[in-house]
Image: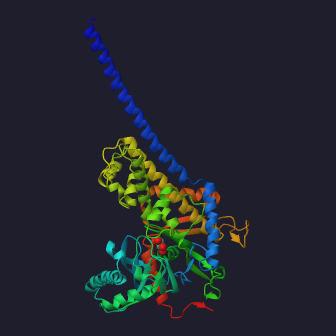
């Protein structure tokens, strides 16, 4: 070989080495980046871990906090609010009643015709409208004028169809799903906003008075016979269909639960007398907090950036308003740690852009190539061209976040059962438990988009209830989905309260 040829061979070898070196370098760097992302996932998994032992601690904490919230005003983050609903609908309610349902993503108007026999809801019509975002943070008057005008259009249509005059007096149940300090079954004061509503001039105001004024401005003659939380409406409908229903849970945009409590256990309200000896208590469990809750840095940051920091801690881990946002935060962190999702897109940095229904669609994508995941990453987050293994990673993140949420909700439900002695352990009575109590059939009515429309969430929740209670006890506990309970239940309560002219609740 001549000199020139030898030099060329050396150069070629060197170039080949360099190319190989670059390729190896790239592989090493991409492996490192992948490793970093896997670390983020692992850290998330550990942070969200909910083994059954931890869930049982949450169950105990819920039961203890329920006691504390009933013992004194402000005694717990669980508000344990009186509802003045002492009798659930009997089934004898008859006539046409209306309901307005405000508190989730949609505002709804319902007309319900009751036939006077249990389970005979003859018909119900519903109209739903998204709540314009500017009304959620504007002025009280504008929100209530919007409500009254949607109701007016609803009754105008009815009037043209059936000949009901517009000025005929209508009885209505108002579902207002925010923490309200009730003063009677049909009056109460807004304590705080949740779920992204923030109308400052409304806090501390009489809710029904605001609605009545808007009706008057719109020339409508309406009597608000019941002011109810959505959980209470759900309990009313659940109980109407099945008298063993003792509690109700909502897991939708927000989350909450209510249940029937003995009046003598409501210690903070001494001298409360009801004909039934019980009253529905609105727990406002979205505000529950315990050091046993598995909290991650994403939860801390989400809370700090929210309009209501330090409030609704349980809700921020569980409900539809927040799950997609937690996932977005995790994907953003992964993108910042490495470039496996490509460069940080401006969309990915927008809070709440990944709504929970989209997250559920990613989680439940069962196509081999995860085409739905690809579509949502591309169209919503502007994250393009991600390989299959990265799409799988996104699904993993959704799974971890949803599993934790569903299992914590399950622990909340069992916490209520424990408090009322329906968890098979006999409940807590002055710190002692009564293991001898026979397990009774116990129904919990449940509603809300997360449970109803998100199959994986529902499965995780149902599974965790059995895991915590054990199969034997869990056989007696039925989680029963109701449909439109928050609205129909309010109409039922309007019916049962409008037919009574004596107040059945007395404060001595
Ligand atoms: C509210 C509750 C409501 C729940 C479900 C929470 O944010 O505080 O009153 O029941 O959402 O809608």
> Residue 490: where, in percent of width, then height?
45, 80
Q: Is residue 135 left or right of residue 418?
A: left
Decide which of 29, 438 is in the foreground and name it.
29
* Horizontal and vertical percent position of residue 32: 44, 38
Q: Residue furthest front?
A: 3
Is 412 in front, or is 117?
412
Q: Is 507 drawn above or below residue 397 in the view shown?
A: below
Picture quadrant of residue 414: bottom right
Q: Is residue 170 above or below residue 71?
A: below
Residue 116 can be seen in this image: no
* Percent of width and height locating residue 429: 71, 72
Q: Which corner quadrant of the image does residue 170 belong to?
A: bottom left
Q: Quadrant of the C terminus?
A: bottom right
Q: Between 228 and 437, which is closer to the camera in this rendering?
A: 228
Q: Is residue 487 left or right of residue 418?
A: left
* Vertical comparison of 364 with 436: above or below: above
Residue lying at the far bottom of the rendered structure: 501
In this picture, residue 147 sits left or right of residue 52: left
State the residue at coordinates (37%, 90%): 213
How many dots with numbers? Answer: 0
């Amino acid at each position: 070989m001549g000199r020139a040829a030898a030099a060329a061979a050396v150069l070629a070898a060197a170039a080949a080495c360099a190319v190989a070196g670059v390729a190896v370098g790239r592989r090493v760097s991409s492996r490192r980046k992948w490793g970093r992302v896997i670390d983020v996932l692992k850290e998330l998994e550990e942070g969200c871990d909910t083994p059954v032992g931890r869930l049982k601690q949450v169950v105990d904490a819920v039961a203890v906090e329920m006691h504390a919230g009933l013992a004194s005003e402000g005694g717990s983050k669980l508000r344990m609010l009186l509802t003045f609903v002492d009798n659930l609908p009997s089934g004898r309610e008859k006539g046409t009643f209306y309901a307005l349902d405000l508190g989730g993503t949609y505002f709804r108007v319902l007309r319900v015709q009751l036939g006077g026999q249990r389970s005979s809801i003859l018909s119900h019509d519903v109209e739903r409208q998204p709540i314009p975002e500017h009304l959620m943070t504007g002025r009280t008057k504008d929100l209530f004028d919007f409500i009254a005008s949607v109701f007016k259009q609803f009754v105008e249509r009815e009037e043209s169809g059936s000949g009901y005059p517009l000025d005929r007096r209508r009885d209505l149940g108002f579902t207002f799903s925010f923490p309200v300090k009730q003063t009677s079954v049909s009056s109460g004061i807004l304590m705080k906003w949740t779920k992204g509503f923030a109308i400052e001039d409304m806090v501390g105001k009489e809710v029904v008075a605001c609605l009545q004024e808007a009706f008057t401005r719109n020339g409508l003659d309406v009597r608000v016979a019941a002011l109810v939380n959505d959980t209470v409406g759900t309990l009313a409908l659940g109980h109407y269909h099945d008298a063993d229903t003792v509690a109700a849970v909502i897991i939708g945009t927000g989350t909450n639960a209510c249940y029937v409590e003995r009046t003598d256990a409501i210690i903070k309200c001494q001298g409360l007398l009801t004909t039934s000896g019980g009253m529905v208590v609105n727990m406002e469990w979205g505000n529950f907090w315990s050091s046993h809750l598995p909290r991650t840095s994403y939860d801390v940051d989400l809370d700090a950036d929210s309009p209501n920091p330090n409030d609704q801690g349980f809700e921020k881990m569980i409900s539809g308003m927040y799950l997609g946002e937690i996932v977005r935060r995790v994907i953003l962190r992964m993108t910042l740690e490495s470039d496996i999702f490509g460069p940080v897109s401006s969309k990915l940095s927008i809070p709440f852009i990944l709504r929970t229904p989209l997250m559920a669609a990613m989680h439940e994508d069962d196509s081999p190539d995860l085409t739905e995941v690809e579509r949502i990453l591309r169209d919503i987050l502007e994250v393009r061209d991600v390989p299959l293994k990265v799409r799988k990673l996104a699904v993993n993140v959704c799974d971890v976040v949803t599993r934790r949420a569903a299992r914590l909700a399950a622990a909340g439900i069992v916490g209520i059962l424990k408090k009322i002695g329906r968890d098979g352990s006999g409940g807590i009575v002055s710190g002692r438990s009564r293991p001898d109590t026979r397990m009774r059939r116990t129904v919990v009515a449940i509603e809300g988009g997360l449970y109803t429309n998100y199959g994986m969430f529902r499965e995780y929740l149902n599974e965790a209830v059995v895991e915590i209670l054990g199969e034997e006890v869990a056989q007696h506990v039925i989680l029963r989905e109701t449909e439109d309970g928050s609205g129909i239940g309010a109409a039922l309560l309007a019916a049962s309260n409008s037919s009574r002219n004596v107040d059945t609740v007395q404060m001595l």
